[in-house]
Amino acid sequence: MIKVGVIGCGYWGPNLIRNLYNAPNCEVTICCDRDESRLEKMKSLYPSIQTTTDQQVLLYGDLDAVCIATPVSTHYALAKSFLLADKHVFIEKPITHSSASCMELIRLAEQRQKVLMVGHTFEYTAAVNKIKEIIESGELGEMIYISSTRVNLGLFQPDINVIWDLAPHDISIISYLLQEDPITVNSQGRSHYNTGIEEVAMTTLNYGSGAVAFLHHSWVDPNKIRSMVFVGTKKMLVYDDISPNEKIKIFDKGVERPQYYDNFGEFQFAYRYGDIYIPRVEEYEALGAETRHFIESIQNGTRPRSDGYSGLRVVRIIEAANESLDSGGGAIPIISDIGAMMMPESTQEVIR
Amino acid sequence: MIKVGVIGCGYWGPNLIRNLYNAPNCEVTICCDRDESRLEKMKSLYPSIQTTTDQQVLLYGDLDAVCIATPVSTHYALAKSFLLADKHVFIEKPITHSSASCMELIRLAEQRQKVLMVGHTFEYTAAVNKIKEIIESGELGEMIYISSTRVNLGLFQPDINVIWDLAPHDISIISYLLQEDPITVNSQGRSHYNTGIEEVAMTTLNYGSGAVAFLHHSWVDPNKIRSMVFVGTKKMLVYDDISPNEKIKIFDKGVERPQYYDNFGEFQFAYRYGDIYIPRVEEYEALGAETRHFIESIQNGTRPRSDGYSGLRVVRIIEAANESLDSGGGAIPIISDIGAMMMPESTQEVIR
Amino acid sequence: MIKVGVIGCGYWGPNLIRNLYNAPNCEVTICCDRDESRLEKMKSLYPSIQTTTDQQVLLYGDLDAVCIATPVSTHYALAKSFLLADKHVFIEKPITHSSASCMELIRLAEQRQKVLMVGHTFEYTAAVNKIKEIIESGELGEMIYISSTRVNLGLFQPDINVIWDLAPHDISIISYLLQEDPITVNSQGRSHYNTGIEEVAMTTLNYGSGAVAFLHHSWVDPNKIRSMVFVGTKKMLVYDDISPNEKIKIFDKGVERPQYYDNFGEFQFAYRYGDIYIPRVEEYEALGAETRHFIESIQNGTRPRSDGYSGLRVVRIIEAANESLDSGGGAIPIISDIGAMMMPESTQEVIR
Amino acid sequence: MIKVGVIGCGYWGPNLIRNLYNAPNCEVTICCDRDESRLEKMKSLYPSIQTTTDQQVLLYGDLDAVCIATPVSTHYALAKSFLLADKHVFIEKPITHSSASCMELIRLAEQRQKVLMVGHTFEYTAAVNKIKEIIESGELGEMIYISSTRVNLGLFQPDINVIWDLAPHDISIISYLLQEDPITVNSQGRSHYNTGIEEVAMTTLNYGSGAVAFLHHSWVDPNKIRSMVFVGTKKMLVYDDISPNEKIKIFDKGVERPQYYDNFGEFQFAYRYGDIYIPRVEEYEALGAETRHFIESIQNGTRPRSDGYSGLRVVRIIEAANESLDSGGGAIPIISDIGAMMMPESTQEVIR
């Protein structure tokens, strides 16, 4: 039985607690928040849980692991203290606010032989894993173009901009699907409400394979959209995370060069339009799969799918995006030998 | 009665001819194309029309005006020859392939006191004019963010990239609505099918007023989307050009700062959600209004709404976008005194 | 503090318990089900709740009220026993399986001066109350036509047909909005999977005022639809219960007779198309409002909005629909003096 | 070369003329309308066409065939006169206003060995023929339930009700697909604007095979809907005629009896949800296929797909629906031996 503590009981923490309660071989013994009313709420929902406003209690308690669901700026210091106290650590996305601090956590976890996992929840959804299966089958052909739109109204974050808030989803999904890091990143954005905290941004990831990904993020769009388009050389796939029954659509469409047609030098590519296929996507709560994976990684001593390197990959790209955004939108390179470092030979290597 | 010739009878030319036929005080006397089968088709639809494969015939014929619907690369040379032959000239968008050539046409038209008009059709649609009315009423507040998605599958152009093909629509709409030029432009894109002819691109226009516009263009998207989002400080407006009955939606939504809430330093902006209003948009063919406006401008000796300067404004921004695209996506400035030049004091000044 | 017991902890009962727990002045002391695993589940969620498999325990316990969420066939006998034991009674819709048994419950509740309430949940939704406000303002004009589509796949009931299952929603909504009972009812249906248990049905309600309502119910439709159209003499309203942000749409459309046009005796009514307005609908859980209303009715000794007469009105129409369905679909009259009986002079009369 | 005349140049006639012009082996020599302005319009579009306001001119002219696109009440008398004058006859749907008059036309056409065809256009669409192919492959299983919604706002007919106007589409489609006639028909409706001319109606067709079809027709619905649902024992199919790219959707869904579950006698059918498949539907104008089929039937002396019997089948069901509507909505039988008469052994029998 893995004993787990949870720090942060605001928006996301209670979801973690609920899923950890349902995970096999796991016992949530304690939760921590500065706000006593949140702790009372947790106590009313889970009468057996201990509560505390003092994070030190988690350090010295009889815990195997700690889950961190606090604001991003606190991730690094909290995770470091828990790793030093020999706890396995799960951190909500983004893993930390800088690649330097993330790399330090990775090294520390390796030294202490502890699991370090980041909550890239989409890697545990049925839809994303179905898309991975489709891409790996070769059905779409070579990937040439990805476009993601993740916009809605409200839910401004006070301390991080819209890229830090929303891009971890897209980047972790694309990295998981393509198993490739971009070589350069561009980004433009704008802050109107909170100086220096961009609420809209458009980020471009350029890949060595030739693929390009456009990421559109906004907190000020009247419609809630969660849509990704994957254009391959053979087929196209649209992933609409909001659609209840049509999450994934595969379009048997493509572009074929027609014979040359000379009308003042004009010709057009043919428009090939074909069948559409909507595979069934199983419904389950991704967070349940994610929390079970954390517990199993601890039990089996295996590296989790969304490990520290996965977190680092996301943070590095977001850092580059922000650097581009702050310097006029030019291309910022992602240095490749660090990329190599981030791709350990075996992702299932025993770490204990 | 204004006698008009049309050059180019491929995709768009026949639409021009049909609308010119229905315009008052206008007579389409001749059409020209290199492809005889296109001319035969025109003859079968309009038995009284003369046809020719020789563009010289239009130069020396008894024509008041010529409409040019040929590939972009031919616009400048054709327009120049017709202006020199003292014809009024209408050119399909984009007006020319460079700002230098466009400026030369503007000067020539001014010297010859001829109408020079570009086919920015959206400026003549009921929807865009309704949006202009709404923005000018102050209902949306100050404009802070515009996002346009203009994507579909197929209809590749062989000689110009997706920005030259699709951005004229967005830029002419935004310029018409905001009456402001961007100060810098960024763009990223990718070409897979035709080296050097980008089929996807993401362009950002940064305005001195603080507004930013994101333009997403693609020829390789499985869905056809023609959607623009206008976010003002008071309200938001969505323009969906494909929706038959809900082209314009006004959202009484906004973001208001809530009281500070201290939960590990966390607080959130409130999500204010309100009524939605869908004004009726009259239905008519924009091209009809556009062609009538050309004829009226000739008759009244007035500067058309989408004149040479309007065409220049679009071309300069597209040039900057392509410059950015070719140099890593950094910000390319739009020089402001030329901007001033492009905004003549009176847009209704008599030119004859 | 009103002490409440709940009988039936299957699909709907747990929702009742959860909402009663949050209702002021209410204490859920006990729940009852034949299935011990359901009781254990309730105990795990609400550690302080007592559980029993013996409904007699509720009869003789220290309870003020009982909520019945068991299959329809058991409603009457259970409710009767609880009323005889001087408990206030809440019954899930439909109130009973026959108007005779319903009338007996009404009389019994009146004799014992107890609250008898039926769970017509839609009468407590924000959307239906917004529609009521709009209709009563006269904005739609006189109601001439209502169409309801309530279809989905699955969730077959074993003991009642699709009309008994789904029509209570539509009939209670329409009765609440129009405050009028139909004078005749027609219905056609079909059973394929379970002989005698129709899984599709089309029911027509004809009103003395001239209005007609079509109700389409199905358990075998690939799409889930919950849509009602209200056509008035002035405007039209569409209520889409599934849409997250556009639940109510008001169409400023209507039909106006044009001048007569003689073309082989042909003329057409003009098509008037106008603005569309989508009012904001507040979001809250209707079942919360409903359970609070039950508790308040007990405390204040007032007749609940969805009282026994409301339940009877629904049951009588469903009985007539089934009679029509069993006899070839002809019109079955709803006898009006019982209608009068069902409309007590004061619906806020003190009953204690 | 078949010489054809067209009578009626209002709403539909011009579409017939345009398609006949493009049909091989066909020459439209003359058109007739009481309204001279309509004739002038036709003359401007087709300079070679003769025009007349006198229908007698068509009787005695050098014509092989006549197409009738006038109001329904005039169909019978016109068609009879043309058949007696030895012309092949094409009539817009519904073929006539009564089954008696329709039977007389059938007999007359057989005596005179002339083609009698009715304009059931949907039988010539790509979508309906694709559905026919799918049904005949057995993919959907046995048909148990059809639901059609054909509603919009406006376009009231002055002389026929909404059933006569819209039901011919549904009935001809269903008859074409199922090759079966209903045994009874029910209908309810309502007229508000024009006494006796129902603008809304709900019609039920009951088939001997056990299938049932619900047809919902309305001229007063704010949304334009053209949707049919086909529920088979194996799969379900939705046909949305308005959707540009998703006209046909096949749902791999069904209902399976689960094991009995005893919770107060409660159990539920399982909800089986599977893949969705959207086959490509070729795009072409159905009216073009229909007019070519008319010309080919004349040339080859073959019975057209939508012949007089097809027209009679539709008229008989509409007559029954109106009889039901006028008598309280009860079931009206469709006498079966006439049904037999309407199904000639060979539908490709040579008639010349």
Image (spheres, coloured by chain):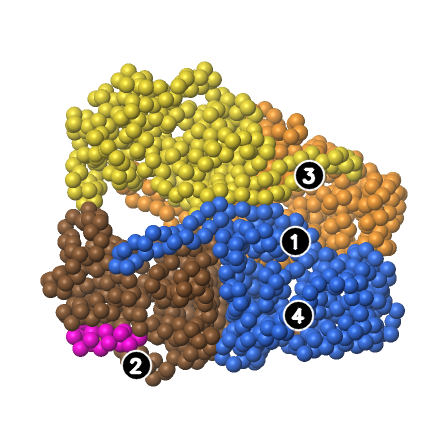
Chain colours: A brown, B blue, C yellow, D orange
Compared to residue B158, the image places residue C81 above or below, namely: above
For the magenta stretch, what is the residue range? A99-115
Residue closest to the eye, A267 or C18: C18
Q: Name the residue under label 3.
A: C270
Residue A105 highlighted magenta (yes or no): yes
Q: Residue at x 45, y 15 (%)?
A: C337
SS at mark 2?
helix
Callout 1 secondary element: helix
Instruction: Please name the residue that numbered disc 2 is placed on.
Output: A341
* Label 3 Cα crowd, 10 Å radius (few <14 / some 14-19 / many 20+): some
Mark 1 belongs to which amino acid? Ala
CB atoms of marks 3 and 1 within 8 Å: no
Q: In this picture, is C86 found above or below B211?
A: above
Report in which chain the residue with disc 2 lies.
A
Q: In this view, does B267 lie to the left or right of A140?
A: left
Residue at the spot of label 4: B342
What residue is shown with label 1?
A: B126
- Say what amino acid the circle numbered 2 marks: Met
Q: Compare marks 1 and 4 and give the one earlier in the sequence.
A: 1
